[in-house]
Image (spheres, rainbow, N blue to C red):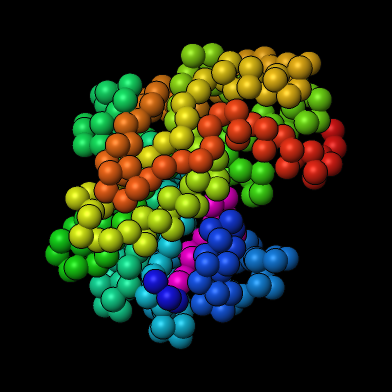
Amino acid sequence: MKYILIIGSTGQIGSELTMALRSGYGNSNVVAGYIKGAEPKGELLESGPSEEADITNSEQIAGIVKKYKIDTIYNMAALLSAVAEAKPQLAWKIGLGGLFNILEIAAEMRCAVFTPSSIGAFGADTPKKNTPQDTVQRPQTMYGVTKVAGELLSDYYFKRFGVDTRSVRYPGLISHVTPPGGGTTDYAVEIFYSAVRGEVFKSPVSAGTFMDMMYMPDALCAAISLMEADPAKLVHRNSFNITSMSFDPEMLKSAICKYVPDFRMEYEIDPVRQAIADSWPDSMDDSCARKEWGWSPKYNLDSMTENMLEEIRKKRVQR
Ligand code: AKB
């Protein structure tokens, strides 16, 4: 991995992943791909090259791969679960049509490809607790359909054309840098801003709704370490279960109350997000990732909560 293109570099994961890759591989070797209307700004723009890279435009992406002699593509373009339910056609176009474009380019130009999957690749028929690596995957959301199909398509390109495709099933990602947009797990980010502002937080999912979650530094580390892993040790490729913690809104509230004792939460259930969350695992078994490429998260609920509050306080967020 020497010359890297990130598709979706200004998104929730992409913005931090681009900076992490630049610090590891050199600023000029990591191209920040963006779409019109979501141009990079500040450090992301100034620290290295950036190019318009619309995943639905094969020629544009192929041109960038040629120009920078790209050998690794991080494909971070996607609509998150709740938005994908509102715009299923666009979710398919970006999630599956876009992935197909990337895999075709990768096969022709010999690039490795990382494409995140998600806990959304599971469905209501999947075992909910300690969800195995290899199990039933029958999601009933467009997000989930694109994620399962994306896993299969990536494995197909590996087996058929030798494209070095790798992927993790991300849980809900929590970060204080770039906000998520339209996910089911977004509440676990928004709650911290409410706590720092001294507001009452309205949880869109009910008490007892458990989902896997992860702090962004661990999520970045997962993507980079998997792409650097010895291929001979990979039994799986697309995609690995990974998790750091599993909690419901009450557990997260209690963790916050340790640092913000008067924090209050109420419930205002969003039926779309609740239905999606109910179909996802409560907690995944990530032992294959641990065994095959040494996955091991650093943050747990308490250390993540402490760091999130500290970082958001530094931003001096206003009511
Ligand atoms: C979402 O909630 O849609 C994402 C995910 C878990 O894939 N954060």
Q: Position of residue 49 (x, y in %)?
A: 59, 77
Work out which residue is located at the far bottom of the displayed protein and give it. 67
Residue at x 14% of width, y 64% of height: 160
Residue 301 quadrant = top right
As drawn, is 202 to the left or to the right of 23? right
Residue 50 quadrant = bottom right
Residue at x 72% of width, y 34% of height: 309
Residue at x 81% of width, y 30% of height: 197
Magenta span: 4-14
Residue 262 vs 259, above or below: the answer is above
> Would residue 5 be counted in the magenta stretch?
yes
Q: Is residue 105 in view from this perspective?
A: yes
Q: Is residue 121 in view from this perspective?
A: no
> Would residue 46 be counted in the magenta stretch?
no
Q: Position of residue 87 (x, y in %)?
A: 47, 44
Depth check, front residue: 180 or 88: 180
Depth check, front residue: 110 or 314: 314
Split into 4 quadrants, where in the image is the C terminus?
A: top right
Residue at x 79% of width, y 38% of height: 313
Residue 319 vs 268, above or below: the answer is below
Residue 264 quadrant = top right
